[in-house]
């Protein structure tokens, strides 16, 4: 038998020209530099749930990716809502100034996966097998797969001038993002490491953050081209308002799953994207066929 070569991504630019592999040798798992990078990233994740690999991308990749995002911005879905950190309704039985009853603006938009061209450089990095193996190593997982969802797998988060993402927790265990376009002012990622635990919501401390007491809060100085791995289940976080005279802030959000071929639920997809694709309907049908429950 002959070895089957990795299928080539149709992006005309090789990944080696997009990721700075000299500095961050994610493709050389047997090298001491790779071991050091994984150890450092794991240590940061253990310490406060956040690891940043600075200048992960080559500077030359940034204008290419920025231009790509500008090209697909017509597919941006924008909304302005007011959220509490739990994305839930308020609780009339609790005091008015309780963390659960404290809402703040979440304004911004996202560009869905099906807007990306087949030749996308952002997609080439997202899907690159050595990167997936490296991220799995950092998270101490046997393997990860690209989220097969045709709308949610790879997205761009956009914050235009004047927009912000208020304090919240994520529902997923970890997020992998690359900042492509930074704001010139504002648009700062802030987080309060492990402010809650599985057994203690620590509402008082959450309320302090909401009231702009930033004693427990760390602020990242992210730059375009930085890669961030963030565990957002237990660490309250936000992106501050992008200044009104700043360019838009764009992050590429890489979604992965531990099992292959995972697709989002039909109803949830309709809520998030305002539409679903035939793949979502097919997945839902095969789910109900394989469901052996009686009700
Ligand atoms: O755009 C970012 O840097 C991350 C925003 C965020 O917290 C999220 O999408 O859940
Ligand atoms: Fe988040």
Image (cartoon, rainbow, N blue to C red):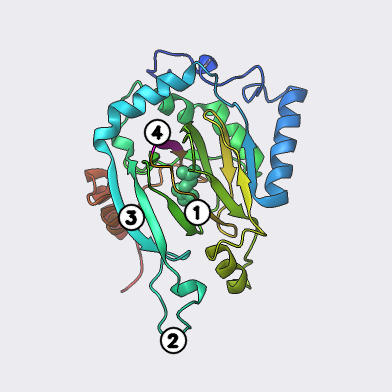
Position of residue 182 measured from the top left corner of the image (x, y, whole percent): 48, 33
Query: What secondary structure is found at the residue carrying circle 4?
Result: loop
Q: CA distance from mark 3 to mark 4?
A: 34 Å
Which circle's residue, 4 or 2, is located before the other in the chain?
A: 2
**Residue at image point 46% right, 38% down:** 254
Image quarter of residue 26: top right
- The residue wearing badge 2 is 93
Classify mark 3: helix, strand or loop.
loop
The residue indicated by pointer 3 is: 265
Where residue 172 is drawn, which disc sits there? 1
The Cα atoms of the two marked residues, 1 and 4, are separated by 29 Å
Q: Nearer the viewer, residue 74 or 214?
A: 214
Q: Residue at x 64, y 63 (%)?
A: 195
Circle 3 or circle 4, nearest the eye: 4
Q: Is residue 184 above or below residue 165?
A: above
**Can residue 5 be seen at all in this image of the molecule?**
no
Q: Nearer the viewer, residue 203 or 43?
A: 203
CA separation in Å, label 1 and label 3 = 15 Å
**In terms of sequence position, does the residue under pointer 3 or pointer 4 come before the other?**
4
Across and down, in percent, residue 205 comes to: 62, 69
Residue density around tag 3, few if under 14, some if 14–19, many if 20 or more, within 10 Å: some
- Give coordinates of residue 131: x percent, y percent: 56, 29
Q: Nearer the viewer, mark 1 or mark 4?
A: 4
| Closer-to-camera residue (85/140) | 85
Q: CA distance from mark 3 to mark 2?
A: 32 Å
Residue 255 picture location, percent across and down: 46, 42
Residue to which mark 4 is pinned: 247
Between marks 3 and 2 in the image, the one whose residue lies nearer the viewer: 2
- Camera-near label (2 vs 1) is 2
Start-end of magenta stretch: 245-252
């Amino acid at each position: 038998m002959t070895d089957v070569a990795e299928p080539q991504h149709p992006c005309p630019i090789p990944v080696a020209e997009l990721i700075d592999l000299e500095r961050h040798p994610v493709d050389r798992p047997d090298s001491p530099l790779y071991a050091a990078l994984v150890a450092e990233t794991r240590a940061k994740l253990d310490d406060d749930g956040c690891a940043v690999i600075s200048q992960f991308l080559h500077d030359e990749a940034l204008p290419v990716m920025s231009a790509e995002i500008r090209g697909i911005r017509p597919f941006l879905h924008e909304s302005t809502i007011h959220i509490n950190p739990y994305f839930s309704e308020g609780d009339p039985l609790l005091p008015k100034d309780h963390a659960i009853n404290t809402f703040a603006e979440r304004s911004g938009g996202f560009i869905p996966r099906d807007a990306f061209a087949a030749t996308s450089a952002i997609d080439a990095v997202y899907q690159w097998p050595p990167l997936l193996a490296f991220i799995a190593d950092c998270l101490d997982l046997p393997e990860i797969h690209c989220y097969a969802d045709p709308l949610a797998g790879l997205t761009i988060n956009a914050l235009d001038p004047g927009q912000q993402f208020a304090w919240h927790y994520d529902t997923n265990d970890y997020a992998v993002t690359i900042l492509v376009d930074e704001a010139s002012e504002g648009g700062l990622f802030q987080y309060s490491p492990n402010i809650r635990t599985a057994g203690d919501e620590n509402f008082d401390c959450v309320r302090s953050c909401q009231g702009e007491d930033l004693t427990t809060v760390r602020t990242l100085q992210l730059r375009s081209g930085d890669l961030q791995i963030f565990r957002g289940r237990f660490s309250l976080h936000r992106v501050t308002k992008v200044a009104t005279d700043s360019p838009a802030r764009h992050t590429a959000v890489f979604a992965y799953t531990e099992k292959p071929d995972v697709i989002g639920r039909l109803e949830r997809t309709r809520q998030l994207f305002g539409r679903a694709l035939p793949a979502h309907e097919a997945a839902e049908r095969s789910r109900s066929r394989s469901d052996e429950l009686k009700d």
